Amino acid sequence: MSEASSRVPNGNRSRYFLIGAAVAVLAVVLIVFYWRNMSDTPPEATYTQAEAYAPMEQAVAETVEVLPDFPGFSARGWYELPCSHSGVDDPDYTNIEISYSFSDEVSADALARQQYVGVLRDQWTQLGYSVEVDEGAGEFYDLSVVREDGIKLWYRVARVVSLKVQSGCVPASESSEIPYIPPSGGVVPGSANDGVADYFPDGIPTENLTADAVDPFATPTGVPSDE
């Protein structure tokens, strides 16, 4: 032991040790506090809830356009998933999910279960979307991508094949601010298969829609049907 250290009383050594330990503990607490506050801050969103429905529905319409021999969707639904931060649901944010599903008959066909997976993989890759999931097991398959604006597209092959679009966590809007966007892919607006009624308690506003929006697969007047 050096002469200098031998001159430090044992009581002072203990005091210095305790001060050092306290400083270290305080540093850890500050780091944890900073990290938790940063993780509690939701990521910046491109859209609010009310603003997100239009680009999400447009994404569905654009997807339908690239699917060959498209048979039409059977139903549409609007849903909301919780947004959690540090394990606690945040009522000021929501994650919109728009889900379009095929009928049981179409879902059983290889066109929807296999061919469309390849078509969408090529299309979404060409558009530069970030692939999140591209895998399956047995008869099931999931292909999901995320766009630069945070919107997620998810083609899901299960018993029923569906196309889902999710907004990611966005600031929640008042129900009165949410616009009605007509469905794509053959779902008739305002019908029993247009699952958005919870957002429009006074009735789904379909009175001002064009004929194309009401029945986009209808044969134009004077044009013979292929059937």
Image (tube, helix red, strand yellow):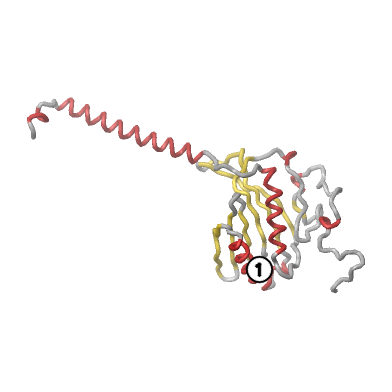
Nearer to me, 196 or 132: 132
Q: Position of residue 8 (x, y in %)?
A: 13, 26
Q: Is residue 10 above or below residue 200?
A: above
Q: Residue at x 75, y 39 (%)?
A: 176
Quadrant of the rendering where the C terminus is positioned:
bottom right
Q: Position of residue 191 (x, y in %)?
A: 81, 55
Residue 29, picture quadrant:
top left
- The residue that mark 1 highlights is 116
Quadrant of the rendering where the N terminus is positioned:
top left
- The answer to whether 74 appears left or right of 90 in the picture is right
Q: Position of residue 129 (x, y in %)?
A: 58, 58
Amino acid type indicated by mark 1: Tyr
Residue 189, picture quadrant:
bottom right
> How many numbered circles does the render carry?
1
Q: Position of residue 220 (x, y in %)?
A: 88, 64
- The answer to whether 82 appears left or right of 199 in the picture is left
Nearer to me, 149 or 188: 149
Mark 1 crowd level (few <14, some 14–19, many ≥20, 10 Å Cα): some
Q: Is residue 81 above or below residue 129?
A: above
Q: Residue at x 66, y 68 (%)?
A: 116
Q: Residue at x 75, y 60 (%)?
A: 185
Q: Residue at x 68, y 52 (%)?
A: 56
Judged from the image, the secondary structure of the residue bearing numbered disc 1 is helix
